[in-house]
Image (cartoon, helix red, strand yellow):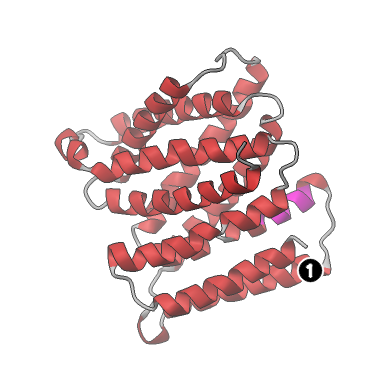
């Protein structure tokens, strides 16, 4: 049986591909076209893999709907930010969702803000500032403040969703969660697309294979993560650290797919951020 550490590592690797596929896909189609189509493809694949009953308590259905709305907003903000920044910079700033998770656990669950957590937050913020500095030319920031704020808001919403995941997987199975989550995403994104855009470029979407790659990554990555969350012996703190493997991958893929610069410096800064995250989890 594959253990939760391997499953989380697989999620991290697939998530790195997912982030890059999203950025490539919006080069040919609008944000809402990409979100609507890859959500639909992901839902169809998930439905075909579904083995558990889709009948669940209405209360849990509402929780999944709430999670879906949060993710809809988070992904729209993230893709808008992604259009304005390098994928490697996006990947590192995206790490700040871990800090939001820690802060939410303090506020919502009443956990104490320890010295290690404080030191970790300082390190993460320092790493993010350094990454932003080297993202521009001659030390100037390449990303506008609005894009960074959008991505940070997205990170906060993703952190909120992660807390919901841990709670809801004690009530429903991983496949039930994924089925309804993708169903709600698909419906919401298509409603937005049909109201937002008068003309939909179906021909371009059919040729945009990055949308298919994003959909497959979403299905299999989330399935691995949800199964890992279901396992009683899994530790959220350790899983959180393992997930950050995707940041290193995204920086490397940023060089391969987008010919981004300063890769070595970004990798070093990402290690600083990860060290800060590790400190918050001691």
**Residue at the extreme bottom of the image, as rendered:** 138
Q: Circle 1 is placed at which residue position?
A: 116
Left or right side of 122 for 178 = left
Q: Is 202 colored magenta in this rendering?
A: no
Front one among 145 and 276: 276
Range shown magenta: 100-107
User: Can you give x and y, in whole percent of width and height, for residue 275 in the image?
Assistant: 65, 70
Left or right side of 204 for 148 = right
Left or right side of 193 for 275 = right
**Which of the 4 quarters of the picture holds residue 141?**
bottom left
Kindly tell me whether residue 127 is visible in this rendering.
yes
> Image height check: is 281 above or below 74?
below
> Image height check: is 237 above or below 215?
below
User: Can you give x and y, in whole percent of width and height, for residue 117 in the image?
Assistant: 76, 65
Q: Is the magenta stretch mostly helix, strand or loop?
A: helix
Front one among 129 and 1: 1
How many residues crowd around disc 1 within 10 Å: few (fewer than 14), some, or many (20 or more)?
Answer: some
The residue drawn where x is 22% and y is 33% is 198
User: Can you give x and y, in whole percent of width and height, for residue 50 in the image?
Assistant: 49, 20
Q: Is mark 1 on a helix, strand or loop?
A: helix
Left or right side of 10 for 162 = right
User: Can you give x and y, in whole percent of width and height, for residue 248 in the image?
Assistant: 48, 65
Q: Is 102 colored magenta in this rendering?
A: yes
The residue drawn where x is 58% and y is 34% is 67
Quadrant, the N terminus: top right
């Amino acid at each position: 049986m594959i253990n939760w550490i391997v499953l989380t590592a697989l999620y991290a690797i697939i998530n790195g591909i997912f982030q890059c596929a999203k950025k490539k896909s919006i080069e040919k189609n609008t944000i809402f076209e990409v979100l609507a189509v890859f959500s639909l493809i992901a839902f169809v694949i998930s439905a075909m893999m579904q083995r558990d009953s889709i009948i669940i308590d209405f209360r849990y259905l509402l929780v999944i709907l709430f999670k879906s709305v949060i993710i809809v907003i988070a992904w729209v903000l993230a893709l808008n930010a992604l259009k304005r920044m390098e994928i490697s910079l996006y990947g590192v700033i995206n790490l700040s969702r871990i800090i939001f998770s820690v802060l939410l656990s303090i506020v919502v669950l009443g956990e104490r803000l320890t010295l290690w957590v404080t030191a970790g937050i300082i390190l993460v913020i320092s790493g993010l500032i350094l990454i932003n500095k080297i993202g521009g030319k001659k030390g100037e920031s390449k990303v506008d403040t609005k894009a960074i704020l959008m991505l940070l808001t997205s990170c906060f919403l993703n952190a909120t969703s992660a807390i919901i995941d841990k709670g809801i997987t004690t009530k429903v199975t991983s496949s039930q969660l994924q089925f309804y989550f993708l169903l709600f995403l698909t419906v919401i994104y298509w409603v937005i697309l049909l109201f937002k855009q008068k003309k939909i470029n179906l021909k371009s979407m059919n040729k945009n294979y990055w949308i298919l790659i994003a959909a497959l990554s979403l299905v299999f990555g989330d399935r691995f993560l949800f199964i890992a969350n279901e396992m009683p012996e899994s530790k959220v703190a350790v899983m959180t650290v393992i997930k950050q493997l995707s940041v290193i991958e995204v920086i490397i893929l940023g060089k391969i797919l987008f010919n981004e610069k300063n890769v070595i410096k970004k990798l070093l800064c990402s290690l600083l951020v990860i060290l800060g995250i590790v400190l918050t989890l001691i």
